[in-house]
Image (spheres, coloured by chain):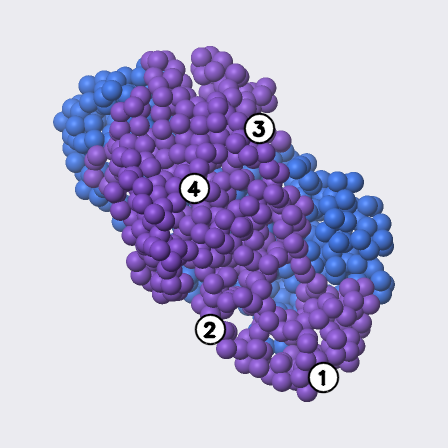
Chain colours: A blue, B purple
Amino acid sequence: MALRPVLLTDRYELTMLAAALADGTADRDCTFEVFARRLPHGRRYGVLAGTGRLLETLADFRFGDAELAALREQGLTDPALLDRLAGFAFTGDVDGYAEGDVYFPGSPVLSVRAPFGQAVLLETLVLSVLNHDSAIASAAARMVGAAGGRPCIEMGSRRTHEEAAVAAARAAWLVGFGSTSNLAAGARYGVPTAGTSAHAFTLLHDDEAAAFRAQVQTLGTGTTLLVDTYDTMRGIRTAIEVAGPELGAVRLDSGDLGDLAVQARALLDSLGAHRTRVTVTSDLDEYAIAALAAAPVDGYGVGTSLVTGSGSPTAGMVYKLVERDGVPVAKTAEGKRSVGGRKNAVRRHDAAGTATAEVVSPHPVQARDGDRDLLVPLVRGGRLVDDLDPAARLRAARDHHERARTALPAEAWSLSRGEPAIDTVSS
Amino acid sequence: MALRPVLLTDRYELTMLAAALADGTADRDCTFEVFARRLPHGRRYGVLAGTGRLLETLADFRFGDAELAALREQGLTDPALLDRLAGFAFTGDVDGYAEGDVYFPGSPVLSVRAPFGQAVLLETLVLSVLNHDSAIASAAARMVGAAGGRPCIEMGSRRTHEEAAVAAARAAWLVGFGSTSNLAAGARYGVPTAGTSAHAFTLLHDDEAAAFRAQVQTLGTGTTLLVDTYDTMRGIRTAIEVAGPELGAVRLDSGDLGDLAVQARALLDSLGAHRTRVTVTSDLDEYAIAALAAAPVDGYGVGTSLVTGSGSPTAGMVYKLVERDGVPVAKTAEGKRSVGGRKNAVRRHDAAGTATAEVVSPHPVQARDGDRDLLVPLVRGGRLVDDLDPAARLRAARDHHERARTALPAEAWSLSRGEPAIDTVSS
C-alpha cells in the first residue's frame, strides 16, 4: 500500500494534536530541538547524517484521502483533527547543523520552529531518519579513519532492512566510503556501486577455472575474483592463469585475513601480478580494519558492522520542546532532563584551524576569531532553502563532512573509549 | 524516486547473472537455502519473521523501464543481461518454515529452487527482509516471555529507519506484543496502534493540570496520562484530580521505574484509583522487564531495545547455493563452510508435545510419532500458495508462533546465555 510518509509516525503525535486543537494550544509558537545526550561507547565524535533525506520527504508530508482513511480505520476520528490534517502543510522554519558535520553531546543538530500542531507531527520521522543515518555515518567515519586512505566498500545491504540498506549506503559514502554494493543507492543518490561475484558463482560452475573464465570474459581482466571457495592459494594461481597478471583484484572473504593477505600478496608477486590488488571482506569493523593496517591489503569491504552502527545501531537523538511562545520550557523530574530555550551553537577553532570547543547556549554567543556558526537555515516558511537534487545534496554533505572532520583535534581519531574530542560549553 | 524492489539489491547479483548468461550456466537448476550459523548472545531460540513481507514483494519483483535505465546509468549495459532482466519474472518454487516458527543454528528457514539466473536475483532482498525482521522478532519474543502476560507496547519507531520501524512493529506483534505506536503498521498490517501524549504536550501548556484536562477532554478518562514531567507524585495527584479515579492509566517514563511504580500504585490506591493502571516505558529491554516482575506494573512500552534487536540488530542469516543440477555443492576453504544438498527439516516432539530435536538432513528423515515437517510450500511456479492479504498473513504467523513457542522446553525461557533449547541433529 503506497501511503505517504506522514503515517511513518507515532500515534501519540496525532492524539496530542487532537487535544491541543480542542483547547486552543495547537497554534502556540514552538521550538523543538534535536540533540543526543551522549555519544555511544565512549566515541570521540558523532556524524550528523540524514538531514538531506529528511528534507526531501517534506514536500510530500501531507495527508491525502488514503492517509485520512487509514487514520479513521484506526479510530482517529476526531473531526477537528481530520479537518486540520486534510489541510496540513508544514509552513515553519528549520535550522540545523549542515549534514555531514560532526556533533557532540548536547549539540542542537536540528531546530524546528512552527506552531505546535505542525512541529509535533514531524517528530517521529525526524528522529527515525536522523537516528538511523547518524548511527551509520558515525560508525562508518571511524572505519574510514582506521582504513587510512585505503578504499572502503559498503556491502551490508543483506544485514539490515531493505530500505535502511539504501540509507546506510548513502551515509557511508557521505563520510568517505568509496562505493556501495547497493544499486538503489546508486539510482537514488548517485553513490558509485561495485561488486563482482559470490561463492555461489564459483559453486555454480563445474570448477573454479570455468567460473573465473566466465567472469573475466564478461567483466574484463580488471575484475575482482573471489578466490577462497576451495583452496585460497590454489584459487589465486587459477585466477592468474585465467586472467593473466593484469587481473584487477582478488578478494578474500574468510579465514585469517591478515595472514592470508600476506600469503596472497607474496603469491601474486611471484606470479608477476604485482598490480593485482588484495581486497578483504569478512566481518570487518573499525578495529579489524585497524588491525590490518600493516597487512598488504588494498581495500576493505564492510557489511554487518557498518549497517548496524558497529554496536550502536541508533544515535539516541531526542526531539524536545525547548520554547513555547518565547518561554523556555524543560522537563524537571528526575531523569531525561533537558535545557530550556532555543540554542545558539558555535564551534571554536584555534589559530591553526583546529576545533577547540562546541559552544551551545540559549544566550547569544560572543564572537571570536575562528568561530563557525553551526546552525544554518534549511527551511523557511515550509520551503527548502537549497534547490539541490538528492545526489548533489549528498555530494555537498560529503564535502562538508571532510572539512568538519579534518578540523577535529588528533584525539578524535582514537578508536579507544574516552571523552568527546572537544568539550561542549555553555558560553 | 519510486523504483521497484528489484533495485534493493547488491550489484554483484547482476554481474553474476551477466557472466552466467555468457557461458550458459544461468539456467542451471539451483537450490539456495537460508539459515543462521548460530544464535546471537547464547540465546535459546530464534524466531523466523519477514517471510510474509518477502512474499508480498514477489509480485512486483520485475524490471521496468525505470529500473533498466537506472542499471544502464550505473554501467550495467551488457545487452544480454538487460534483455534477460526486461523479461524477468520469478517462476521457481519456494519452501520455508512457516513465518513465526522458531529456528535454531542450521535450520533451513527458506529454500529457493529456480534457475540460477532467477534465484540469484532474490538473494539480497531475501536476506535483508529475513535478517531484519527475524532479529526483531527474536528479541521481542524474549520480552514477551519476560513480561509474563503483562501487555507490551512497541514504541521504537523513532530509534530506527522509518521503514524498518514498520517492519519492526509487525515483527513485534507477530510474537505477542499487544500494540504498536506506529500508524503505518496499523494501516498496512492491521496491527493495533496505541499512544496518548509526550512530555512536550505537558510543556506546551501553562501547567500540568491544563494539559491533563485537554487530554482527558479529548481522549476520555480511559486515557493514559504521562505524569513525570515535573514531580511524579504530584503529577499523579493532579491526574486523578483532573480525570477522577476512573483514569485509565498513568505512564512513568524516567527515573527508577520499580521504585516509582510502587509509590505510584500506593498513591493511586490511596486516592481510590484502584483500577488505574501503571505503565512504564523508559529504556526497557527483556532484562529490565524481568527485573520489574515483582513491581506493580500493568504494562511495558519498549522502544530502542526492540527495534535494535536488543544487542543483535541482524539475525546473521545467509543464502547459500547447496545444490546445482542435482549435485550437492559447498564452500570448502577455511571459514564460512556449509553443508551441501537440499535439506529436509523435521521437529521431533515427545509424547507431551514438547520439542526435543531439530532434524536437518539432505537425506530423507525417518518419520516418528510427534514429528512436524518444518518446510511448507510457499511459492509454486512463481505464484504464492496462499491468497491471504497482508493483515491475515500476519495473523496466521502470530498464531503459528504461539503454537511453535509453546511447544519449546522450559529451558527456552531462560534469558541467560546458554545452548539452544533443542539440539539440531542430522538424522
**Residue A401: horizontal and vertical position, in percent?**
51, 46
Task: Kindly check if marks 3 and 1 are in contact, taking CB atoms under 8 A apart as contact.
Answer: no
Residue B283 left/right relative to A291: right
Secondary element at image label 2: helix
User: Mark 4 or 3, which is nearer the eye?
Assistant: 4
**Residue B399: horizontal and vertical position, in percent?**
53, 50
Name the residue carrying label 4: B97
For residue B362, above or below residue B279 = above
User: Mark 4 or 2, which is nearer the eye?
Assistant: 4
- Badge 2, how many Cα within 10 Å: few under 14, some, many 20+? few
| Mark toward the start of the polypeptide (2 vs 3) | 3
**Residue A295: horizontal and vertical position, in percent?**
23, 42
Q: Nearer the viewer, residue B331 or B149?
A: B149
| Mark toward the start of the polypeptide (4 vs 3) | 3
Name the residue carrying label 2: B291
Q: Quadrant of the C terminus of chain A?
A: bottom right
Name the residue carrying label 3: B60
Chain letter behind tag 1: B
* Mark 1: amino acid: Gly
Q: Nearer the viewer, residue B202 or B125?
A: B125
* Mark 4: amino acid: Tyr
* Mark 2: amino acid: Ala
Please report the residue visible at 55 percent of the width from the left and 45 percent of the height from the top.
Answer: B396
User: Mark 2 or 1, which is nearer the eye?
Assistant: 1
Name the residue carrying label 1: B272
Please report the residue visible at 44 percent of the width from the left and 52 percent of the height from the top.
Answer: B404
Tell me the tag on residue A424: none
- State the separation of the CA atoms marked 4 and 2: 33 Å
